[in-house]
Image: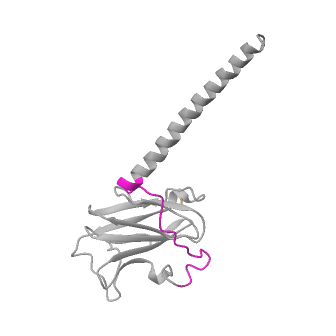
Amino acid sequence: MTEQQPAEAHEQRILGTELLWAFGVGVLVAAVLGMIVFTALTRNINPPSNVERIDPKTLHLSGEFAEQNLGTSVGADGSVTVRAIATQFMFVPHCIAVPRGRPVTLRFATPDVIHGLLITGTNVNTMVVPGFVSQVYTTFTSTGDLLMPCHEYCGLGHSEMWATVQLMLDDQFKPDRDGRVSCAQR
Ligand code: CUA
């Protein structure tokens, strides 16, 4: 019995250390989860929430991502929607016209691999994943041209993949008869 006591004490020490580590890790996990919930609720930082599927093999054939429907369109209610395709190694269209100071809905899809995009100086930043539509809302407050690079490595031409976002004032942002707006030649 007296010989076992040191071994038992040793076991107790190991258990104590393990519990201490488990407690520490538990606190860390709780802190990270808490931060995620906090930013999601208060800062609107969320994983993409709208799970909207689209078949990457046929998206170019018909529907909103067919070539004639890409670009900027203004609905009867004045809502502005941008549709673009991210594909190896370009964005279609290469230039996107948007109004300043009005809410804009941006919708992206890809027929090939995962791309990502951001619009410099704005809060627009999303992945574009095959099989899903990526939808982002924003209101542009600056003027001039903004760069929209692909920010997810998508192949050898990745660094050549970018588009321009052309911000227009109200007197420039004039939809045609079909409600479409294209970039002005500058
Ligand atoms: Cu597309 Cu990188």
- Tell which residue pokes out farthest to the top in this image: 2
In the image, 185 versus 83, the foreground residue is 83
- Tell which residue pokes out farthest to the left in this image: 171
Residue 88 in the image, given as x and y percentages of width and height: 57, 66
Name which quarter of the figure residue 135 lies in.
bottom left
| Residue at the (51%, 81%) spot, across then down | 66
In the image, 51 versus 91, the foreground residue is 51
As drawn, 45 above or below 111: above
As drawn, 31 above or below 73: above
In the figure, is residue 121 to the left or right of 116?
A: left
The residue range painted magenta reads 40-62
Q: Is residue 90 visible?
A: yes
In the figure, is residue 111 to the left or right of 84?
A: right
| Residue at the (56%, 55%) spot, across then down | 153
Residue 55 in the image, given as x and y percentages of width and height: 59, 76
- Quadrant into which the N terminus falls: top right
- Most common SS among magenta residues: loop
As drawn, 34 above or below 23: below
* Residue 173 belongs to the span the image colors magenta: no
Q: Is residue 186 visible?
A: no
As drawn, 177 above or below 96: below
Residue 53 in the image, given as x and y percentages of width and height: 55, 73
- Tell which residue pokes out farthest to the bottom in this image: 177
Residue 186 in the image, given as x and y percentages of width and height: 31, 70
